[in-house]
Image (cartoon, rainbow, N blue to C red):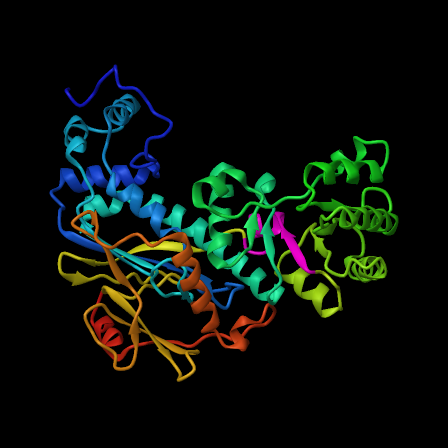
Amino acid sequence: MSARSNDAKHSNNRPALPLFTDLYELTMAAGYLAHGVSGTATFSVYVRGAGLPRSFLVAAGLAPALAELADFRFRPEDIDYLAQTGIFPDDFLDYLPAVRFTGTVRALPEGTVFFPDEPLLEVTAPILEAQLLETFVLNTLGLHTMLASKAARCVLAAAGRPLVDFALRRTQGQDAGMALARACHIVGFAGTSNVLAGKRYGIPVSGTMAHSFVTAFADEEAAFRAYAEVFPDSSVFLIDTYDTLAGARIAARVGKDMAARGHRLRGVRLDSGDMITLSRQVRAILDEAGLTEVKIFASSGFDEFKIADALAAGATIDAFGVGTKAGVSADMPFLDIVYKMVAFAGRPIRKRSPGKETLGGEKQVFRFADSTGRFVEDVLGTADERVDGGQPLLETVMREGRVCVASPSLEAIRERCRRQMAGLADRYRRISAPAVYPVRVSRRLRALQQGLP
C-alpha cells in the first residue's frame, strides 16, 4: 500500500492533527465512508451554561486552531500506525491520504466576550472531515478560552494594577503554559515569567528572584546588593525569606544607596503572610526612607478572588504575580464545551437528550449595545437572518479549507479584548454573584425548531 512507508520519519515539530483525536472520531469516519454517508454537516461549538460560575467568557485559541486545520493531512507514519492497530479496513486506510479539510469555519474573533450557550465557532464541511476535527477543536478552544476567561476576571479584580503571569511551573504541561501566557496577554496582563512565550509571542517578560537566591548569600543585604549590582535599574527584592519587615528595612537601605549612585530600586515583593497588614507596614517603611516610587509587588495564591479581597481590605499592593490558581483555572478547571451537529444534508438537526438539548440549524450571534457602547442583549439567530440593530459576531475565517482573513497581531487581539471588556456593565463584571447577561433566541430560530425530530 503506497501510503504506508516504513521509512517515514516522525517530526516533533509536525502539526498535532489528525491523530490528536479520540478513536471514535476515526471509527465513525470509517463508518461514513463504508456506507456512503458524505453529505455536508455543520457542527456548532459552544459552552453549556448550566452551573457555569462565570458571567462571561473570552474567546481564545482560534489562531492556533486555524493553523492546524489549514495543514490537515494524514502522513504516511499516521496511516502506518492506524494499520498496526488492526482496527480499520484497508479501503479506509487507502482513502485517508487524500483527506484534507475543505470546509468553512465561522468563528468569533479572538478576544471577543461571549456568553454560555452561544456558538464561538461553527464548522461546515463534508461530514467525514468535520467529524475528525471534533476532539482537536474542543481541546484547543476549550483550553485557551478557559484560561483567558479566568485571567480576564483577574484583570477586572486588579482594577488597573499590573498583573504578571507567574504560573508556568504549575501549568499542566508545556502547551498549557504557552496557552496561558498568550491568553493572559490577550486579556491585559502586563507580562509573563515565561521566557519562551516572550520570544514566540513578543510578550514582555518579567521576574524578580527566588528565596534560593537570598539564602545563597550570607544575609539578605548581601543578596540584595549582589542582585542590584547586576540589575541596577530593574531590581525587585524578595523580602520575606526570614522576616518581612526586617527585609523591607534592608531593602530600603540598599535602595537609598542605589539612588545615591543614580539608580533606582523598582520594587519589593511579598510572597507570604498577611498581605494586607504587611503591605501597609512595608509601604510605611519605604515611604519613611523616601522611596515613595518603589512599588510593592505581591505573589502567592492570587487570583481574582484573593486580589479583590486584598484590595477591598485596604492592601497597598501596586502589582500582582498571578500563578497557580489562574494557570489551572482552579475554581473552574474545565469548560463543558461541546461540538454538536446542527445541520446535515440541507436539513437542521436537533438533539433532545435530557439536559443536553441542542438547537438545530446554523447560527449567528447578534449583539445589541446602548449609546455608550455597553452591551445590552445578545440574540441567537439563524446564520442567514438579519436582526435589525444587532451586530453579527461570527465571521467567516476559513473557506474551502483555506484561511480567508488576515491573521490579526496579538496586540490587535489584545485591543479588541480591551474594548470588549469595556462593553460589560458593572453588574456583569462583578467577581462574586454577577448578573446573568440576557441572551434570547430569535423568533426565526425558535420557529425552525418546530417539527424537528
- Residue lying furthest front in this view? 261
Residue occupying image coordinates x 71% and y 53%: 298
Q: Position of residue 1 (x, y in %)?
A: 15, 19
Image point (24%, 28%), residue name? 75
Residue at the top extreme of this rendering? 7
The quarter of the displayed image where residue 190 is located = bottom right
How far across and how far down the image is residue 141, in percent?
Answer: 39, 51
Residue 291 x/y as whole percent: 78, 57
Q: Position of residue 380 (x, y in %)?
A: 31, 72
Quadrant hosting residue 85: top left
Q: Which residue occupies the foreground of this view, 130 or 145?
A: 145
Q: Which corner quadrant of the image does residue 205 belong to? A: top right
Front-most of residues 287 and 391: 287
What residue occupies the far bottom of the structure in this picture? 371
Please state if 360 lies on the left or on the right of 168 as rendered: left
**Observer able to see residue 352:** yes
Viewer-side residue, 29 vs 398: 398
Q: Is residue 26 above or below residue 52?
A: above
Which span of residues is magenta-colored?
Answer: 318-332
State the residue in front, 142 or 261.
Answer: 261
Answer whether residue 326 is magenta in the image.
Answer: yes
State whether residue 304 is above or below residue 67: below
Which residue lies at the image location 68% right of the left edge and 51% below the top edge?
Answer: 301
The stretch drawn in magenta includes residue 106: no
- Evaluate whether residue 328 shows in this view: no
User: Going by the picture, which residue comes out furthest to the left?
Assistant: 36
Task: Name the residue: 40% across, 83% down.
Answer: 370
Badge count = 0
